[in-house]
Image: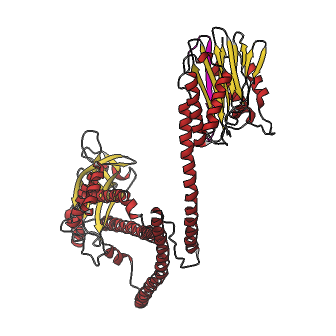
Amino acid sequence: MTPFRASLKEVWNRLTWPDLVSTAVAAGGLLAALFGLQGGPFNFLKYLAVVASVYLLFRLIGWWRDRLLWSLRNRLIVAYLFIAVVPFLSIVTLAVLAGRILYSQLGAYLLHEDLQQRIAMIADISEHIAAAHATLPKGIGEEESERVLAAQSHSVHDRELPKLNIAFSDDASLLGKVAGPAALSFAGIVQEGDRLFLMSIRAMPEHGRIRLVTLRVPVTADFLSGIAPDLGAIQLTLMEKYVPGARQGIIYPTANGQYVMASPIVARNRSLQPPMIWIDVPVEVVSRLDSVYVGKDGTVEPLRPVLAVFNARPSQLNARMFTSFGELRDTYRLMAIGLGALLVLIMIVALIPGIVLTRRITNAVADLYQATQFVKERDFSHRIQMKQRDQLGELAESFNTMTASIGELIEVENKRQRLENEISIAREVQNQLFPSTLPSVPGVEIEAICKAARSVSGDYYDFIQLSPTHIAIAIADISGKGISAALLMASLQAALRSQMLTEGSEHLSMAELVSRLNKHLVRNTGDDRFATFFIATYDSATRTLRYTNAGHLPAFLICKDGSELLDKGGMVLGVMEDYVYEEGALTVGPDALLIGYSDGLIEPENVYGEEFGIRRLQEAAVHVQGAAPLLVAESLMAAAEEWAGTPEQADDMTVIVARLR
């Protein structure tokens, strides 16, 4: 699959239903614009197309953001667009919007002014008729005078006011409804039923009575074709009161209520003027006219809106709004052209250093990126050539220094990794040597805790059941750390178990056992390897405890009448082959507590440099001697950690607790 098809497939997989709908709307609006379709639905479709296009643009930016902005060059281009182009486009957009608002208001003003001029014209005609009627000789009859005055007005104004109707009557009810009971005249726009008129009514006092002259000019398609010649197509739409459920349509709210569109009046043979230049885009305007509504039943509504919809060319409105510059016209034009050329020149001059600086930045970043590829391939010998003594040059120099330092750090890290691997192996060996299950001997409860430090030391403990009533308890501390200590620990465990698991081992002397282990270590390890070791066997039937301590920290036995250190034995294992060890034996009282431990439990120091020590360990054990073995072990660990005041420990902390019932 080609990269282009792969990109298309990726985009298609990311499309959602809003994306598809927006694409269809944008395509429909584009087709409407290409074919020049006009009108309400098509204009609304174009508006929706603009909104959909903006939405799709943001979606597209989100899809391709990582690819577009991956390189620094593209990021700088986007930054320049936001710094320079976006403000410029914002200003242009505001100017265009302000221009459209200005042209819309100007077009609405021209339409309103033309209608007001015609309303003023029929008002003047009615005033002229009233004045002429009052000055006619008495010998002329009323009907004759009215006919003559109407004929004169028609002959003068029929062209400007097509279908002008002049009527005389004695009924003043309409004047009272539209203008008030005391009014003598009215001029304005009147909607009678579904028809619209320019109307003027004037009262003419005559021989003690009131005679009215009424002038009507129907607002028809022919009438609209002759007003406001600077505008394009014009349509007036009559409105009627909104009745819920009666008529569907767009609701037009006003202060006097809600209205819906009733019947339109479209100007005949009237279209938009051709554009003067390519930017002479038409302005679509919706305005409002106020009329007096007179219903068929005689009801009057003093203020009912009439919607005026029209379009206009800005060039036509400019011609109406502005006059010529006169003799200075050419001078102003040359000044505008010169100023524009100067601005273009300034932009070009400013663009050149911008391109140069941008290339320097992108080249420096490209060099850095290429250098990172060498680092990625673990080649730390590559160096960046420093071309300029600026911040980017210093960055390249810093990168060179960094790669050299990284090469050295990797060597250190490799050594540390090897050490950690060794520690991990040693830790695994140590964990495997600890007993996985505790033996079950009547009257004996055993628990052990070994809290490992960062580095692996040689702490080791073991429990071996020799018979249903005999159990062996051992604890040792091997010299050294790491794998060597773990291997020596494994060797010691193998030798111990081979001796203890033979038949009759429950009667074996502890001193003899330790002597054998000592010879084993001396013969099979180096001179710098040794181990402290404590082992004891307990017979629950006779309550006899036999032990030997080979240089290990003395375990202690806590009874009801006090505690006793178990320190009989001799020196550490692995030093002298023929060394003779002692054995200690004692009878254990009821509910005694045997505690063995490693040096990691008594060596923690407080802030004053004082060790926790054996005495404090004994005191802590005496305080909890009645508790379960696990609780005793945890309490001793907590006491040592509390004394140190820090969770960090330098050595393994091991404690074994045996409750001898």
Find out whether residue 443 is within the magenta segment.
Answer: yes
From the viewer's perspective, is 520 left or right of 366?
right
Quadrant of residue 341 in the image? bottom left
On the picture, is 369 further left or further right than 310? right
Question: Is residue 40 visible to the viewer in this orientation of the structure?
Answer: yes
Q: Which colour scheme is used?
A: secondary structure
- Where's residue 427, x and y in %? 56, 38
Residues shaded magenta:
440-455
Q: Is residue 453 above or below residue 51?
A: above
Query: Which image quadrant: the C terminus?
Result: top right
Relative to 34, does residue 555 appear above or below in the rendering?
above
Q: Residue at x 53, y 26 (%)?
A: 436
Tell which of 550 and 452 is nearer to you.
550
Q: Position of residue 226 (x, y in %)?
A: 24, 69
Residue 649: image quadrant is: top right
Identify the residue at horizontal 73%, vertical 36% (top origin).
645
Q: In this view, does 82 lie to the left or right of 439?
A: left
Q: Which residue lies furthest to the left in this view?
A: 269
Quadrant of residue 465 in the image?
Answer: top right
Is 273 a magenta residue? no
Give the x, y percent position of residue 424.
54, 42
Q: Is residue 213 something one can see in this rendering?
A: no
Query: Who's the residue at 53% across and 41% down the image?
Result: 425
Query: Residue 610, how many percent across, how many down?
Result: 80, 36
- In what quadrant of the picture does the N terminus appear? bottom left
- 455 in relation to 340, above or below: above
User: Which of 408 and 93 lies nearest the eye of the viewer?
Assistant: 408
Of the pair 199 and 233, the residue shown nearer to us:
233
